Amino acid sequence: MTIRRLPQLWLQVTELRPLDIGAGGFAVLVRPSGYEFFSLTADFHDFIAVPEGFPRECIVRGESPSSEQTVQTVRATVGGILAEPAIKEVAVTRNGLRLIRQVDEGRRGDYLLLRQAAFDRGPVAVATLIGVIANLRALADGVESCAAEGTSADG
């Protein structure tokens, strides 16, 4: 028997901005299934132990060994973001930040019977988008404060 997952509708918000983290970029993917073609996590090759406060069912990967320091400096902020069950991925790179969040799941009947992805929700709610942008802002502030203190991944 094959278990089929319902189609998911994801909101990906990327803020392009240079960040002074050297080779300390990282990504956290929650509940990996192997079908996350949209994820940046696969582009990073250094595995990082899942920090305390992160969901147990996540993968943390970095750009280099120095990525672990970047993760540790923004651990509380990222942990807070990941506490929201709809969050799928958080990524920090020298080119910017990205959050991916679930906004809807396909209707079961339409998918199981007709293999059609039909979603009940209309456009993304303004409150959802504001929440994602606020999370990106908090993450950017955390990354920039460690760079200002001289604790960036380059040391």
Image (cartoon, grey):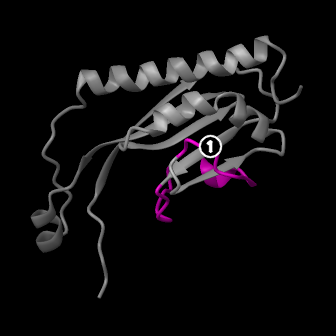
Name the residue nearer the viewer: 54 or 44.
Answer: 54
Q: Amino acid at mark 1?
A: Ala
In this picture, residue 120 sits left or right of residue 73: left
Q: Position of residue 117 (x, y in %)?
A: 21, 58
Q: Is residue 68 magenta?
A: no
Check the picture and name the quadrant holding the C terminus: top right
Left or right of 100 on screen, residue 17: right
Across the whole image, how many numbered discs are drawn on residues? 1
Q: Secondary structure at mark 1?
A: strand
The quadrant holding residue 145 is top right
Q: Which residues are magenta?
A: 31-54
The x and y percentages for residue 94 are: 72, 28
Q: Residue furthest right?
A: 155
Dominant SS of magenta comes to loop
Tell me what residue is drawn at x 65 percent, y 28 percent.
74
Q: Relative to 50, is 154 above or below? A: above
Residue 95, compared with residue 58, is above or below; it is above
Instruction: Residue under label 1, please give it.
Output: 27
Residue 52 seen in the figure? yes
**Residue at x-position 15% and y-position 63%:** 108
Label 1 crowding class (10 Å Cα cut-off): few <14, some 14-19, many 20+?
many
Residue at horizontal 10 percent and vertical 66 percent from the top: 109
In this view, the residue in front, 75 or 28, is: 75
Image coordinates for residue 22, horizontal then vertical, percent = 82, 29
Q: Is residue 106 above or below residue 80?
A: below
Give the residue drawn at x 30%, y 53%: 8
Q: Is residue 39 left or right of residue 134?
A: right
